[in-house]
């Protein structure tokens, strides 16, 4: 850990200091403003949100880093994952844990296949026309949203009961919470570490990281970069789909969740720095916690969650003005 | 043919001044006669529909076909304006904005919020606040000081002029302030992101528009914006701007205002694109680094284009709101829909063409309205030829062949006995799968009563548009007009080259007027 910090460039060290200072500031302000219990609950909610955002944002960041494609359909992948998972979870009649597993499987597989088709069939022919790739993913997001709406209807679906395994409650900061929330946080952390290990400890990870630096060079070294592209795209889509199914027992499945999480993920990627994995992970915490604290604060002072949306946007504007390449991104021209 | 004959005649004029005048006039007429014709048809449109359907143009009651199609046409034209402004930004400037809906929806909200809530005491705080925000963000974004101060002072002065010191805000003042707010917002978002790569701008505008949409429909501000119900303005508009066919509202006049607005927007965009500034933004789209190397400050040109496009979108948004039958500013105007629509129209019509977005929006919107009541089943025959089911089936197979064309080529090579590249079993498997899918799908169609379900065209329209989107992006990147232009101008250019060669062979100079009429960019 210490070695890691010693290896950092001064700019990254400054970014770390900023992040720590900012998180401390958030913690302090929520403690002072809300008192211990509410502050704890808020932070907990923020952590939960951070994990969900991370699942969407990591895919966005990975795909952008390697493929140079900004995948605006990432929110739609989350949506498809949620709805497929919802339908499976509801219709499979096994014990609830097993059917939840089946739902996770169905969501992951369907979103993965969708991602593979999209990359191989739609995005790959457009590498010569990068502008159209962005336009295509944007349109694809709208199409997928439309399809989901046609198949499952406009009505928001209420959250389903969490699987038996996580159905208990626990007591934290004067509030009893479902164990399922802990599961989401654990899932996010596990994925965060697993993908980090994949990137830093495996041969495939080396190829991906090299591809982020210079995909043509990797191709020149005799590695089939296109196949790695497809893999990363599918990985990103699957992570978003996983986020979707994780949301089902927590918030249900609604049509607007794709767009919401896409915006949050975009903010995360801008703050963390495009294509930087660690930046994405750290920025997810920043965004999730900021949002939760801002929401709580505006609920307390204005009686309504006004600040929640705008705080995130303001954060993004400030970062873009002060450090356009994000906290941990490569320098933009 | 006619064109050449006219130019030849012009050339025969002896007097140089008269020849120049006639040449200019001939070009004016020859290049614009089609637009003038379209404008005339649009102007007479209510009467044409009235004649065709046997209804009145301005009946007391009940509203007939002509009245209905007036409002459809007006809204279509306004959407065309939105698409044209989007095309100015994306097609000509190469700047992708995913938040154009923000500018479209902003107009109505700003205008009517001001009319509802404005108090004379708010004048100075509002002006100072807006100017201060612009100054701070502009300074942080390193906009050149001279530009920034000029802009801020101008903005402040215009706002002071438009916000009255006493009494309420009139609609026209409100519209003026709405445009100013849109300009300020363009400058802010442009200043923050336009220096960076295009994706930053796309992401930022998307987030910005989404935030405003959420705010507009959140219940928190119900007392201001009416949340999901929208902001009512029935009592706020004067008769001159009221298209409702009642005693006082003058629908036909409003229709004419809309057509004039459309023509002005079209001409303004044409002028802008053909001006020196427009040439610079086109060169920026083609090669940004080169434009920068030549010495143009690309950032400022992009910013200017964005401001212009945003202001046009705002104005058309206000008119669009006025045409709504509910007389409410709907938060849906800020939603992603109104970004996807102009994007789709731009793409279908042709990126960077003047008429493309107009043609596409006319086709899509009028088609949607015309087919709104139609229903169909999978067994309906299209044009009496194939059933929809068969069309889907063929399209699916065509897609399959397209996606796997390389693999299938290998299979064919295997079958016809070229050097062994895939196993025979693989080839047999693919063919078997294809045949069984075909048989199975036909069996499903026969067995299950798929014809029984009736679909409404209106319900499936968005899906159709979405599919069109993907097809256009993949297969028709230049859009309808762009593809046509390539073919047409290519043909003309080849013909001119042939003629020039023939003339050169006879050692006679090419006529000057004719050369001037040739397109610069085929």
Image (spheres, rainbow, N blue to C red):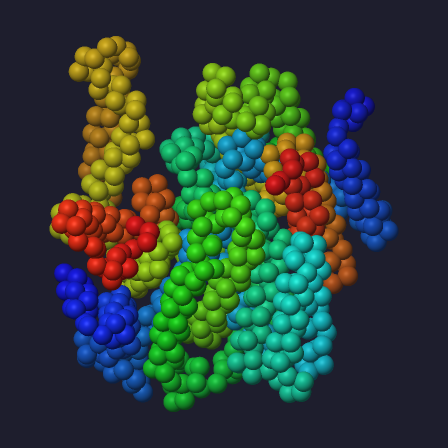
Residue at left offset 24%, top offset 79%: B47
B210 over B41 or under it: above or below: above
B89 over B22 or under it: above or below: above
Task: Using the image as rendered, state which of residue A10 and residue B115 is in the foreground.
Answer: A10
Residue B254, position in %: x, y? 38, 80
B482 over A44 or under it: above or below: below
Residue B26 sits in quarter? bottom left
Residue B208 in view: yes
Residue A104, position in %: x, y? 53, 31
Residue B399 sits in quarter? top left
Q: Looking at the rendering, in which quadrant would you find the N terminus of chain B?
A: bottom left
Drawn side of residue B152 relative to residue B351, left or right: right
Residue at left offset 75%, top offset 47%: A42
Drawn side of residue A134 relative to residue B121, left or right: left
Residue at left offset 46%, top offset 20%: A224
Tally the marks. Answer: 0
Residue A310, position in %: x, y? 66, 56
Task: Using the image as rendered, state which of residue B141 and residue B382 is in the foreground.
Answer: B141
């Amino acid at each position: 850990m210490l070695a890691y910090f010693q290896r950092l460039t001064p700019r990254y060290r400054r970014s770390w200091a900023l992040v720590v200072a900012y998180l401390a500031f958030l913690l302090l302000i929520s403690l002072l403003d809300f008192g211990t219990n509410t502050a704890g609950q808020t932070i907990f909610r923020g952590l939960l949100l951070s994990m969900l955002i991370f699942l969407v944002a990591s895919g966005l960041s990975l795909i952008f880093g390697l493929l140079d494609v900004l995948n605006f359909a990432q929110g739609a992948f989350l949506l498809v994952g949620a709805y497929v998972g919802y339908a499976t979870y509801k219709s499979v009649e096994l014990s609830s844990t097993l059917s939840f597993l089946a739902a996770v499987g169905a969501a992951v597989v369907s979103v993965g296949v969708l991602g593979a088709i999209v990359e191989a069939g739609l995005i790959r022919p457009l590498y010569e026309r990068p502008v159209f790739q962005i336009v295509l993913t944007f349109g694809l997001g709208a199409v997928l949203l439309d399809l989901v709406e046609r198949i499952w209807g406009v009505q928001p679906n209420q959250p389903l009961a969490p699987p038996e395994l996580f159905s208990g409650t626990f007591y934290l900061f004067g509030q009893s919470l479902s164990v399922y929330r802990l599961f989401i946080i654990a899932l996010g952390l596990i994925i965060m570490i697993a993908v980090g290990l994949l990137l830093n400890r495996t041969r495939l990870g080396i190829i991906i990281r090299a591809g982020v630096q210079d995909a043509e060079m990797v191709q020149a070294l005799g590695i089939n970069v296109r196949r790695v592209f497809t893999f990363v795209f599918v990985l990103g889509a699957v992570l978003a789909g996983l986020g979707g199914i994780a949301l089902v027992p927590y918030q249900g499945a609604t049509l607007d969740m794709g767009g919401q999480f896409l915006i949050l993920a975009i903010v995360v990627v801008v703050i963390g720095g495009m294509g930087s994995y660690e930046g994405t992970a750290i920025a997810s915490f920043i965004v999730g916690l900021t949002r939760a604290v801002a929401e709580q604060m505006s609920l307390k002072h204005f009686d309504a969650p006004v600040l929640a949306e705008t705080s995130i946007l303001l954060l993004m504007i400030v970062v873009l003005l002060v450090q356009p390449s994000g906290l941990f991104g490569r320098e933009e021209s | 043919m006619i064109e050449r004959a006219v130019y030849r005649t012009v050339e025969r004029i002896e007097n140089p001044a008269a020849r120049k005048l006639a040449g200019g006039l001939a070009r004016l007429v020859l290049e614009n006669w089609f637009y003038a014709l379209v404008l005339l048809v649009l102007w007479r449109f209510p009467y044409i529909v009235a004649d065709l359907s046997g209804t009145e143009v301005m009946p007391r009651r009940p509203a007939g076909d002509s009245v209905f199609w007036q409002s459809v046409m007006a809204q279509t034209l306004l959407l065309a304006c939105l698409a044209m402004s989007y095309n100015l930004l994306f097609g000509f400037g190469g700047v992708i904005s995913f938040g154009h809906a923000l500018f479209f929806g902003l107009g109505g909200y700003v205008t009517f919020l001001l009319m509802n809530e404005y108090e004379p005491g708010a004048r100075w705080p509002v002006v100072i606040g807006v100017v201060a925000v612009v100054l701070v963000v502009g300074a942080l974004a390193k906009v050149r000081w001279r530009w920034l101060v000029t802009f801020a002072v101008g903005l402040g002065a215009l706002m002071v002029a438009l916000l009255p010191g006493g009494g309420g805000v009139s609609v026209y003042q409100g519209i003026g302030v709405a445009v100013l707010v849109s300009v300020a917002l363009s400058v802010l978002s442009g200043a923050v992101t336009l220096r960076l790569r295009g994706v930053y701008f796309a992401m930022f505008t998307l987030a910005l528009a989404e935030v405003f949409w959420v705010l507009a429909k959140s219940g928190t501000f119900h007392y201001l914006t009416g949340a999901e119900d929208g902001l009512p303005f029935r009592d706020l508009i004067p008769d001159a701007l009221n298209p409702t066919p009642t005693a006082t509202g003058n629908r036909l006049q409003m229709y004419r205002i809309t057509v004039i607005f459309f023509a002005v927007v079209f001409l303004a965009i044409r002028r802008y694109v053909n001006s020196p500034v427009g040439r610079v933004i086109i060169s920026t789209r083609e090669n940004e680094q080169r434009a920068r190397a030549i010495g143009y400050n690309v950032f400022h040109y992009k910013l200017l284009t964005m401001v212009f496009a945003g202001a046009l979108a705002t104005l058309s948004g206000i008119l669009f709101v006025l045409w709504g039958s509910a007389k409410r500013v709907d938060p849906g105007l800020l939603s992603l829909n109104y970004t996807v629509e102009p994007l789709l129209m731009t793409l279908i019509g042709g990126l960077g063409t003047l008429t493309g977005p107009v043609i596409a929006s006319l086709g899509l919107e009028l088609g949607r309205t015309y087919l709104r009541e139609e229903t169909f089943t999978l067994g309906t025959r299209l044009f009496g030829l194939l059933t929809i089911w068969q069309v889907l089936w063929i399209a699916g197979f065509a897609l399959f062949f397209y996606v796997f064309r390389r693999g299938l080529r290998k299979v064919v090579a295997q079958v016809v006995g070229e050097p062994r590249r895939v196993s025979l079993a693989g080839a047999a498997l693919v063919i078997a799968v294809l045949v069984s899918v075909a048989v199975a799908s036909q069996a499903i169609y026969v067995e299950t009563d798929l014809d029984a379900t009736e679909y409404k065209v209106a319900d499936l329209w968005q899906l159709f548009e979405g599919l069109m989107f993907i097809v256009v992006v993949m297969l028709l990147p230049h859009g309808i007009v762009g593809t046509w232009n390539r073919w047409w101008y290519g043909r003309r250019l080849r013909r001119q080259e042939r003629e020039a060669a023939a003339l050169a062979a006879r050692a006679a100079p090419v006529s000057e007027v004719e050369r001037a009429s040739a397109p610069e960019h085929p």
